[in-house]
Every structure is written in C-alpha cells, then in structure tokens.
Image (cartoon, rainbow, N blue to C red):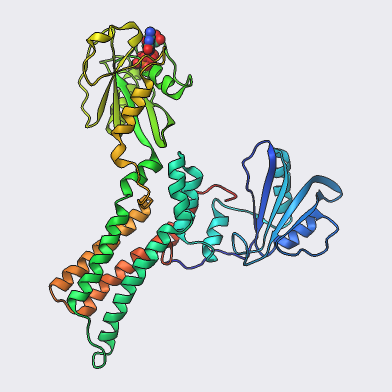
Amino acid sequence: MYMNTFTQTDTIAAIATPLGVGGIGVVRLSGEGSEQIIKKIFKSKIENFEPNKIYHGWIHEDDTLVDEVVLLYFKAPNSFTGEDVFEIQCHGGINIVKKILKLCLSNGARLAERGEFSQRAFMNGKMDLSKAEAVLDLIHAKTDRFAQASVLNLSGRLAEKIGLLRAEVLNLLSLITAAVDFPDDVDEPAYSQIEQIIESVIFSINEILGGSVSSNLMREGVKVAIVGKPNAGKSSLFNALLDANRAIVTEIPGTTRDVIQESIDIDGIPVVLIDTAGLRESDDYIESIGINLTKETMENSDIILYIYDLTCPECIEISHKNVIKVGSKADLADLKSINKGVIAVSSTQKTGLEALKQEIKNNVAGNIPAESDFCTNLRQQACLKECKESLEKALEGCENCDPQDLISIDLKSALISLGEITGEVVSEEILDNIFSSFCIGK
Ligand SMILES: Nc1nc2c(ncn2[C@@H]2O[C@H](COP(=O)(O)OP(=O)(O)OP(=O)(O)O)[C@@H](O)[C@H]2O)c(=O)[nH]1
Ligand SMILES: [Mg+2]
C-alpha cells in the first residue's frame, strides 16, 4: 500500500508542449516555490499575483529580455496538480521554451519527471487512477472511436461504476462485521442474502470485463501481417494500403528482409500493418533471419493477409487460425480464373484495396466496442479478475456455511482489488509504472 514518500515540497518545471516551432509554447511550474521563481524571471507592473488571472509581461534573465509572454496563475488547491501552478505561454520556438525552462531550473525548480504533474494531481486527490489512465489513453488513441471511449472514463464512467461496486461490498462487509463484533445485539445476515449480493457484484464485473477484448484491440491495434512468397507483391500492397512509399519494392525476389510495421485507420479500427520477408528456403544468412522473423510475426498476429501472385499462382501452406487470401497483380491476371474467397488486388492500379479493407473490418467486427462497453486496460482487467476470484471464494464459503468472519476475509481482498483500480489502495511500484508512461510535462 502506498505511503507518500516522495517529496512534494520541491517545485517542478517542464515544457508542456511538443518541442518544435508552433504558435505558442508552454512551460509549466508546480509547487510551493513557483511564485518565488516567477517573481525572479517575470517582469511586469504587477507586484503580487492573484489566482485565476492572466498576466502579460516579459521573461528576462538579469537585464536581458528573453520573450514576451502570457502568464497564467492557479493557486493551490485549485489547480491541475492541487499545488500552486504557473503556466508561461511564450512564443513557440525550441530555443525560447528551452531558455525559459532553464531559467526556472536555475532559479530553484527541479526538472519534472515523466508524468509527475499527473502523479501530483493523483496524490493530491485531484483525480483517481482510472482518470489518469484515461488521459493516457486519450493522448495515445489511434482512432476517434477509442478516443471517445477514453473520454468517457476521463469523465468518470469506470470510476463511478467501481465506486458503486465497492459500496456494495463494503455494505455487506459491515453487515457481517457488526454481527461478528456484537453477536448478542446483531443477527448474522442470512447466507442467501450474502450470496445474492456477491452474485450481483460478480454479474457487474463480468459486464465490465465483457469489454476487455475490444478495449485491448482498440488500444493495441489489430495486428495484420502480410505474408507470402518472395516477389508476390507484399511490400507493394503494404505501400498501397498505407498510401505511402514506406517499404522498398524491386523485381528481385528477397527484397524485404526486416519486419516493417505502420498503423492505419480502417473506419475507426486501428490496424497495425506488418510487411515481412517472403517465405522460401534460403541459404542467404540475412534473408533466413528475416524469414524466421516472418514466422514469429505470424504467430503474434491477429490476421494474416496471405498474398499470392495471380500471374503465377503457386501456393504455400500457411498455418494460422485467421487467414485472408489475397491475389496480387490483378492488373496482369485473367480474373475469370480466380478462386472463390480470394480478394484480387492491384497495388499499381489501386484496385481491390477497399474490398480488402472491408474484409479486414468484417474479420474483427465481433470485437469492435459497442457504446455500452466499458473501456479497461490490462491492469484494470487484472484487478477485476482478482476481485472476481475473491468473490467466488466467498461464494464457496457461503455454500459450505463457513463462519462468516472467514467469508469476510475474501470480501476484504475483493475490496482491495477494486480499490486498486481507482487508486484508493495501490503500491508505489504500480504508480511509478503508470505515471512513467506519461510524457514529461504531463
Ligand atoms: N503489375 C503489377 N506489378 C506489381 C504489383 N504488385 C507488385 N508488383 C511488382 O512485383 C514485384 C515485386 O513486388 P514487391 O512488392 O517488392 O514484392 P514482395 O512480395 O514484397 O517481395 P519480397 O520483399 O522480395 O518478398 C515488383 O517489381 C513490383 O513492381 C501489381 O499490383 N501490379
Ligand atoms: Mg517485400
């Protein structure tokens, strides 16, 4: 269980916008010392800052002006981190933001670690863990559809549901504990009553877990490997689907040796396309490494696009549970002789690509999240499964008419697992793990 060991007294600073040339750049400061630092580097007519106001002025280093800026001030606890926060909005140039950050650091701030602003927000009770993780999902969402699901969690959908379940388990636990502690005054709840409550919580957990497969798929993307013999036209198809010249294409068999991957969006489904080395027996050392990589990639892919050249239809065996057959170079082939169930494409003429995309989409149709689905990540799913196991043990205890104080032990474990989802109970290691996947300045 976490103890708040990290020192929150120091003031942290970071560049909050991407490094590059843009309209504005933002440097963020958080912590008790923020105001002192700002007073040293910001010149304006104002002596004392009032919260929730915007100030115009200049950042300076001694007598040298650095940039004309707008300054935002949020006073603790009414800020993103719950601490005193200043945001310096300067002109968006790499040198300017770096210079301002350097000034903050030389005047007493420490460079923020990855996700440290969000971690402070969590520590100060500004947001629960499921919301912090939703922020992360939202930033990294590969498609609009997944972004929408993440926003729902950011607005508290998962946290609220978990809160309700915690309340139910906690209620049950108090019924049992009261009877255990005051056996003369309070009656034990009936085993059937305990069972009923546990079963309804398990039902809800199953409902949430029902969205796991689609959540994972939307977060990770559907892995689609393009596989076939050398020269079949795999890299050409890869480029055509990407609409970019990403992979090298030549008429020499064995051109591709490495595994190359890029993401595309097919009607809101994130798809990770993977181009591979052509499958054949090879004495070439490097090529055979590539061919082994192809085999590994096939095992880890959700769908295989098996490409064969329609102008010389020589087939190989592909063992995978989910194969879409694609005939390439349709522009050169006699389409009348194409087998049923094969999608004919021409990467040079760009025909058949839409049909292929639809086929990929239909293939994963069962795993596209419905609006009612809960969006969860692997960590949250693991907590839910642990919770369910504890509840199932408690149910078993009821069936055996075990003493109720024994049953309450499993209920307590279930409660802890639920608390881990929103962060009421969570280890420091888990926290570090979550927040280190944020970027610096977030
Ligand atoms: N006419 C025509 N030629 C194609 C088409 N697709 C690929 N080719 C040609 O076929 C040859 C091989 O294409 P690649 O895309 O490099 O084939 P590959 O399967 O990636 O080959 P390896 O990387 O060697 O395994 C090249 O000369 C391409 O121009 C197509 O749709 N129509
Ligand atoms: Mg290739």
Number of numbered labels in the structure image: 0
Q: Is residue 364 above or below residue 305?
A: below
Whether residue 434 can be seen here: no
- Residue at image position (45%, 39%) is 143
Single out the residue that lies furthest toward the bottom.
184
Q: Is residue 148 above or below residue 76?
A: above
Q: Is residue 433 above or below residue 98?
A: below
Q: Who is closer to the viewer here, 300 or 392?
A: 392
Residue 184, position in %: x, y?
24, 93
Single out the residue that lies furthest toward the left.
400
The quadrant holding residue 50 is: bottom right
The quadrant holding residue 280 is: top left
- Residue at image position (26%, 89%) is 186
Whether residue 212 can be seen here: yes
- Residue at image position (23%, 21%) is 341
Residue 105 left/right relative to 401: right
Q: Who is closer to the viewer here, 414 or 23?
A: 23
Quadrant where the N terminus sits is: bottom left
Residue 272, position in %: x, y?
39, 32
Residue 429, position in %: x, y?
43, 58
Residue 268 left/right relative to 393: right
Residue 202 left/right relative to 163: left
- Residue at image position (54%, 56%) is 118
Residue 155 left/right relative to 217: right
Q: Is residue 80 above or below residue 294?
A: below
